[in-house]
Amino acid sequence: MKKSALISILSVVVIIGGLILWYFNTANGERTIKNFQSNNSGGLERTVKVYSTDGKLIKEYSGKIDIKDTEYGNKVLFDLNGKRIVIYNATVITEEK
């Protein structure tokens, strides 16, 4: 292999590596890592608080939770202790512990 071809390949590898390092140090990259961890470990330690439309706390959940919301924003679902919890038309605040 020619020396110039080797340098070209090495340059491409260094550039790609640099872009990967840069991406995972951005806020979006950090969210990607957090989503990966949550998806592959059954969730993250979280507290979920559900509020009524007038601001009163209805229910609070704690534990290892992987949240899924819907495209239209009117439903949130998650599994906790082997039970599926589905919340419709409420304000849901999720906080990682």
Image: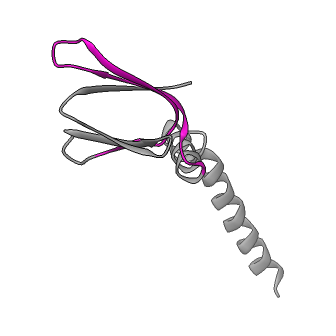
| Residue 56 location, quadrant | top left
Where residue 64 appears, as percent x and y from the top left, is 55, 37
Colour setting: one colour
Asked whether, in this view, residue 8 is left or right of residue 59, the answer is right
In the rendered structure, does residue 74 fall within the stretch colored magenta?
A: no
Where does the magenta region start and end?
41-69
| Residue 93 location, quadrant | top left
Where residue 27 appears, as percent x and y from the top left, is 51, 36
Asked whether, in this view, residue 67 is left or right of residue 76, the answer is right
Q: In which quarter of the image is the N terminus?
A: bottom right
Residue at the spot x=22%, y=12% of the render?
A: 55
Residue at the spot x=22%, y=28% of the render?
A: 90
Asked whether, in this view, residue 74 is left or right of residue 10, the answer is left
Q: Quadrant of the C terminus?
A: top right
Residue at the spot x=71%, y=60% of the render?
A: 14
Where residue 25 appears, as percent x and y from the top left, is 60, 39
Foreground: 45 or 34? Answer: 45
Where residue 52 appears, as percent x and y from the top left, is 21, 19
Tally of numbered tags: 0
Residue at the spot x=60%, y=53% of the render?
A: 19
Give the main secondary structure of the magenta stretch: strand
Foreground: 54 or 61? Answer: 61
In the rendered structure, does residue 47 fall within the stretch colored magenta?
A: yes
